[in-house]
Structures are given as C-alpha cells and as structure tokens.
Amino acid sequence: MLEKTFNYDSIIGMETKENYINIVGAGPSGLTAAIVLAKHGYKPRVYEMSPNVGHRMNGDFQGLENWSSDSDITVLLRDIGIDINFMCIPYYGGDIYAPKIAPLIIKSEKPIFYLVKRGADNYDSLDNGLKEQAVYCGAEIFFNRRVDSFEGKTIIAGGPKRAGFIAVGITFETETKNLASVIFNDEIAPKGYAYLLINNGFGTMATVIYKDFKNAKKYFKNLIDFFNNKKNIDIKNKKKFGGYGNFLIRDTNVFGKKIYIGESAGFQDYLWGFGLRYAILSGYLAAMSIITGSDYDYLWKKEVRPMMKTSLVNRYLIEKFGDFGYRYIAKKFAEGNPLNFLKRNYNPSFLKNFLFPIVKKKYKVYGNL
Ligand SMILES: Cc1cc2nc3c(=O)[nH]c(=O)nc-3n(C[C@H](O)[C@H](O)[C@H](O)COP(=O)(O)OP(=O)(O)OC[C@H]3O[C@@H](n4cnc5c(N)ncnc54)[C@H](O)[C@@H]3O)c2cc1C
C-alpha cells in the first residue's frame, strides 16, 4: 500500500534542508515523525511535557499487532525507516478463555504479535529505542516542556484527550514460564478483554474495559481471582499501571499549520485498542506529507481510515453478540489460522462497509468534536 503512496524520486536531494518542525509529544507517533523528518534533513524539535519518554506507561508489555497487513510489522517498520533497537519478541500463540467453554489453544506459524516493553525505566523499551533513534538522527527533544500553541508547522502528537476505553493492570516479577493468555468475559472486562503476558521473569496482567469504568477496580479484582483459579502464577514486586485510549474519526486532521497524528488525531483500533501501529504509521505519513509536500488528509484517509471504520463496525458487532461472539472468536482463533481470521476482520469488507453508515450513528466518534 505505502509503496504506491509516495514518489520516492521526488524526495531525493532534500537532505540538506534546514527546516525546523515542532512536534508536541514524544510518544511513538511523535518520535516516528521526528525520526523520518530528521532522516530527510529536517530539524525536528520535540517538546515533551513529562521528564522522559514513555511516562504514561510503566514498564508494561504491549503487543505490536502483526495481523492487519500481509507484510510482517518488523519489515514495515524497517521500510519506513525505524530500526528494531528495542525488545521486540515474536509470540506465536497462547491460550484463550471465553464464557462457558474450556480454554482453547491458539497457534500460528507466523508471529501473531510482537511483545514490546513500554516506559522510560527499561533501556530496551519501545519508547527508549525510538528516543535513541530520533536523537541519533539529529532530532532535539526538550523534556518537561508542555506546549499548547506554536507558530509555524507543528505536528501535534499529544496522545489521547478523552477515554473511549480504559485499561487497569499490574506489572510484576515472576518465575512462571513465558505465556500469553487472553480472556473474553464481561465480569472481568466488560465489552473488552483481559490479558496476561509473561516473558523471561516479567509479567503484565490487565483488563481493558469499554463500559462501566467506575467499577474498574472490581473488574481488576475479578481478573486476579480468575488467574488465581486457573493458573498458578507467582507475583512479586507488582506495580500498578493504567491508562486510556481515544478513538475518533475526524473530517480533517490538518488545522492551519497544525497536523494531528496518533491518538491525538483519534487514531486507534476501536475493537481492542491496538493503537501502536496507527501511531507509528501516522507519524510516518505526517513526516512524508511535509517532505514530499503531499496532502496529509489524503494520506491518512487512504492508509488509516479504512481500518478505523472497520474497527468501529467490529466494536458494534462484539458489543451486540456478547458471550456468543466471544465464544465464536475464541473458536475461530483456535481452530484455524488466527492471523488470517484477524486480518480478514481488521480489513474492510463489503459487509462492514455496508454496516458502517448505520453503526456510526450509534457512536459519537465521527466528525470534528
Ligand atoms: C494500558 C495500555 C495498554 C495498551 N496496549 C496496547 C497494545 O498492547 N498494543 C497496541 O498497539 N497499543 C496499545 N495501547 C495503545 C498505545 O499505547 C497508544 O495507541 C500509543 O501509545 C499512542 O501513541 P501516541 O504517540 O499517539 O500517544 P502517547 O503514547 O500518549 O504519547 C503522547 C505524548 O505526548 C505528551 N504530551 C501530551 N500533551 C502534551 C503537551 N501539551 N506538551 C508536551 N507534551 C505533551 C505526553 O506526555 C506523551 O508522552 C495501549 C494503551 C494503554 C493505555
């Protein structure tokens, strides 16, 4: 897809440009934009209100999804100029729990997702890796600098501003062997899902909730009880973490000289919150729109919006079908090729395009708010 979007010949010879571009926010989207711009001779200045990158996260594991494109996500990252200088471990399966059925095993020949670490405290986190690359390429990053307005071309990469879903979890040390588990159960994660990821002595357990936020503590306790019953996991030195995600499909993400990317543009996977891919991709697209003089709105509408529209329909369907839907997904994951199933459902189809106009009326996530 991306290969067709840009005429790479047109950017040859731009390496000596002395243009300064402001970027607000040093999350994955802002840092990706900074890396790509700096590699093309621009001078990105990234302003981050926190003392370091990844401040919103706390050493938790996240999954870089590997299902929505044919190409492996690590290849796509390299193609857009991002090196894998951070922990990025392929996971090929795990187990899955849904109401009233026995746990099922998921297996895939290709990685379903890559495990990455978030936050500033781990040298091998995604955030530190991107920071290192941005600085190495010549971007300047100013920490403890909250900025709310700028003159000149500015990329806004400030993350979510409201909660479409919330996540509550812990990170911990453990002697339990590596595993990945996912749970669909409204008593633990209303309309969302919960997960347990363990890798080489470290674990992350969290519930991702789309309804009834005020009872998040209760759902998290149910999650702990669930795993105490099902698995014998030792948990040491636990630390709490949490956060939220924002989904919004705007008519435009260009406001004067401001270009919105990542979650500040509302780019998210509304089904399950796998927003990293959108953050990185939109950072790249914003940078390329500046480098090539192309229309950013055209680019994100072509590369990001179709999957977001599909994810809105997916959200509607999962909320509508409840436990039946959870069992259906669990069985589909386990019985065939989970990557194919995910890819088919994350990408637009005739049915989902047909349902979209009906579904969008049910969610206040469309247009400029
Ligand atoms: C608990 C949790 C688990 C998740 N798990 C996954 C997962 O497994 N897989 C996945 O793909 N996605 C996951 N996500 C989503 C993913 O983390 C986000 O989509 C992604 O981080 C968005 O990147 P971003 O750059 O748009 O925003 P952010 O990562 O939020 O970065 C924005 C940055 O901007 C800074 N900032 C904000 N305002 C200002 C300002 N005015 N001035 C200066 N700086 C400012 C903030 O401090 C922050 O550092 C998860 C999210 C949460 C909360």
Image (spheres, rainbow, N blue to C red):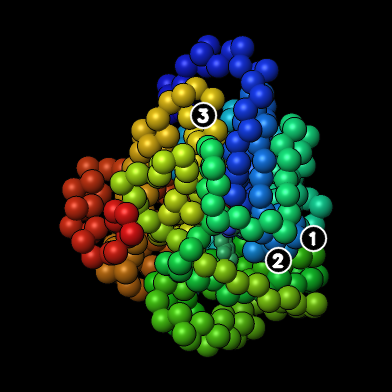
Residue drawn at x 21%, y 61% is 361
How crowded pointer 3 is (Cα within 10 Å; few <14, some 14-19, many 20+) is rated as: some
Residue 338: where, in percent of width, then height? Answer: 47, 50
Mark with earlier residue (3, 1):
1
Q: Is residue 173 visible?
A: yes
Residue drawn at x 78%, y 34% is 136
Residue 233: where, in percent of width, then height? Answer: 71, 76
User: Which residue bears the numbered disc 1?
Assistant: 121
Residue drawn at x 48%, y 86% is 215
User: Which residue bears the numbered disc 2?
Assistant: 58
* The N terminus, quarter of image: top left
Residue 204: where, in percent of width, then height? Answer: 67, 68
The quarter holding residue 163 reads: bottom left
Alpha carbons under labels 2 and 3: distance apart:
33 Å
| Residue 123 in the figure: left or right of residue 324 | right
Mark with earlier residue (2, 1):
2
Mark with earlier residue (2, 3):
2
Amino acid found under the numbered disc labelled 3: Ile
Ligand 1 quadrant in view: bottom right
Q: Which mark is residue 290?
A: 3
* Numbered disc 3: secondary structure: helix
Alpha carbons under labels 2 and 1: distance apart:
8 Å
Amino acid found under the numbered disc labelled 1: Asp
Q: Nearer the viewer, mark 3 or mark 1?
A: 3
* Numbered disc 1: secondary structure: loop
Please state which of residues 94 and 160 is positioned toward the viewer in this rendering. Answer: 160
Residue 341: where, in percent of width, then height? Answer: 40, 48
Please state which of residues 307 and 349 is positioned toward the viewer in this rendering. Answer: 307
